[in-house]
Image: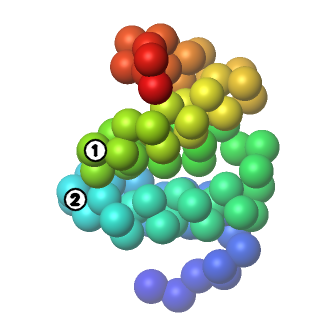
Amino acid sequence: IGMDASNQDAVLNLGVVDARAGNWLSARNHFTRAIEINPSSDVAWFNRGITNQNLLQMSDACSDWERSAALGNQQAAQLQQQNCNGL
């Protein structure tokens, strides 16, 4: 697939495709790239948190959800509250 590596939506979509296929490492790489393109993307931070959770990297997941929640993502705030006490 050809794409502009600076297109955040395209990079996010590739991450979602990989996540749905269970390709967690590739998905995390795409979400990290989306964050590099736009650090204010609550969706990219949220999705990378889900990916880190599936990779059993809960400290990283909680950090990502914290950032996403700070950017206004309520779902991230809920996941952080449910999963991150004491981390």
34 displayed left or right of 86: right
In the rendered structure, which amino acid carries the disc numbered 2? Ala
The image position of residue 74, as x and y in percent, is 59, 16
Which class describes the residues within 10 Å of circle 1: few (<14), some (14-19), or many (20+)? Answer: few
Residue found 65% across the figure and 79% down from its top: 5
In this rendering, the label closer to the viewer, 1 or 2: 1
Amino acid, disc 1: Leu
- Mark 2, other Cα within 10 Å: few <14 / some 14–19 / many ≥20: few
Picture disc at residue 80: none
Q: Is residue 16 left or right of residue 7?
A: left
Of callouts 1 and 2, the N-terminal one = 2
- Furthest residue to the front? 86
Q: Is residue 67 above or below residue 52?
A: above
* The disc label shown at residue 56, or none: 1
Observer able to see residue 71? yes
Vertically, is 72 above or below 44? above
Compared to residue 30, the image places residue 87 above or below, namely above
* Relative depth, front residue between 3 and 51: 51
Which residue is nearer to you in this view: 12 or 62? 62
* Res 24 quadrant in image: bottom left
Report the residue marked by disc 2: 21
> Horizontally, is 3 left or right of 58 in the view?
right
Q: Position of residue 76 (x, y in %)?
A: 53, 24
Residue at x 61% of width, y 66% of height: 33
* Residue located farthest toward the left when viewing the structure as drawn: 22
**Label 2 SS:** loop
- The percent position of residue 22, horizontal first and vertical second, equals 21, 57
**In the rendering, at what x and y percent does residue 8 appear?**
67, 62
